[in-house]
Amino acid sequence: MAKTENFLLSIVLIFLPSVVLGVYDVADFGAKADGKTDSTRSFLSAWASACATNGPTTIYVPRGSYLVGQAVFEGPCKSERIIVQIDGTLVAPANYESHGSSGHWLFFHDVQGVSIHGGTIDGQGMSLWACKASGNHCPDGAESLTFTNAKDVVISGLTSMNSQLYHIVIDGCTNVLVQGVKVVAPGNSPNTDGIHVQESTGVTITGTGIKTGDDCISVGPGTTNLWIEQVACGPGHGISIGSLGKEREEAGVQNVTVKTVSFTGTENGLRIKSWGRPSTGFVRGVVFEHATMQNVQNPIIVDQNYCPHEEDCPDQNSGVKISQVTYSDIQGTSASQVAMKFDCSATNPCSGIELQDVKLTYQNHQPRATCKNADGSATGLVEPPSCF
Ligand SMILES: *[C@@H]1O[C@H](CO)[C@@H](O)[C@H](O)[C@H]1NC(C)=O
């Protein structure tokens, strides 16, 4: 290219509006960084433009605070690669009625190749939690960030604060990376699970810190090929596979790896939980490896007797078969006397539970392990001694 042409090209580029280069700044769509002007429509317009673009695009959220109400970011999109770069904070309306009964705040559906980088989302859950604590009739609330029926998703460097309900939900998705995310909510905030995964395959969660009032990470039916690594939990209820087996017809959970995780002051550490009622669900092929526990109520627990309203749980027999579960290099302190509890189904006993190098203490004493309908083996140093 000749020099003059080059020069002309740069002039043209300078004067082209940024959108032509595939960057959609929400400010250009009218979003106000004042934390009180409703910017929902601006975000949705930016999304519509990005979604309709051929080729890769970026939606940019500058610094500042943006009030955003319930929003559905719908695909499929023409663009196969949409980056949402957030330097600011998205704030939900303080009034929990404003999301309606949808159960969602920021909802991505039927998208492919969407990445969210950086930023903060603030669900402003306090008023709903207060309502729930008062015993009044309150709505369930809204999940803060939900992906359903999505593929090739990245969520990185995002902070999720004070969600009304679950913070991040991955449901019906394929190939999702959650990396360097922070979840922050009070230890007594109800139903504020950090990350919930279900009906999804190829989900990886790494380098993430979760302080919340419910499960750190919860794994629902139909989850396969899940990888969790370098996650710090607490306060909260720990990492939980389940509750499973609520439905009679239910997909199983298979091939889950949880490694290099820490639990501080949590209710549970590594938990598998099912309803005590008939189901086709199962859990097969789980590795829990390199976990440290600090003052954890139930460091290792399998509980197949869940039935909060005692409905439809004949003899508390869970149909969920749990097999091939390994606990390897699990260390630290239990806050209760029973540090390992395998309370499995009488009709579908746990099998192939392997313990390798487990060392848990309780107030400088040896805690206990309890088994019901559980079969497995122990190798290396295992304290408390296994009960198989
Ligand atoms: C299990 O899941 C991991 C990802 O978490 C994947 O790399 C591996 O191939 C899966 N194994 C099988 C047998 O599918």
Image (spheres, rainbow, N blue to C red):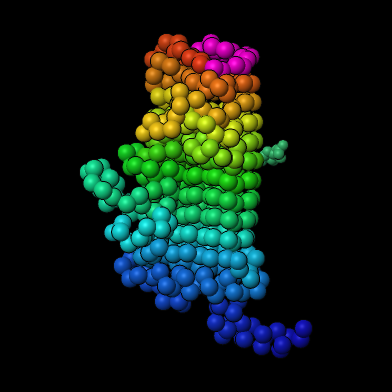
Q: Quadrant of residue 313?
A: top left
Q: Residue at x 63, y 64 (%)?
A: 81
319 to 142, vertically: above or below: above
338 to 129, vertically: above or below: above
257 to 180, vertically: above or below: above
Please indicate whether residue 138 sits to the left or right of residue 83 in the image.
Answer: left
Please indicate whether residue 157 sits to the left or right of residue 173 in the image.
Answer: left
What x and y, as percent, mark residue 22? Answer: 59, 74
Please indicate whether residue 4 sits to the left or right of residue 384 in the image.
Answer: right
Res 272 visible: no
Q: Residue at x 60, y 16 (%)?
A: 375
The quarter of the rendering in which ligand 1 is drawn is top right
Which quarter of the rendered picture does the N terminus lie within? bottom right
Residue 382 falls inside the magenta stretch: yes
Residue 93 falls inside the magenta stretch: no
What x and y, as percent, mark residue 380? Answer: 62, 14
Q: Residue at x 63, y 69 (%)?
A: 79
Q: Which residues are magenta?
A: 373-388
Q: Residue at x 39, y 35 (%)?
A: 235
Judge by depth and name the residue closer to the eye, 115 or 5.
Answer: 115
Majority secondary structure of magenta residues: strand
What x and y, as percent, mark residue 233? Answer: 45, 36
What x and y, as percent, mark residue 309? Answer: 36, 33
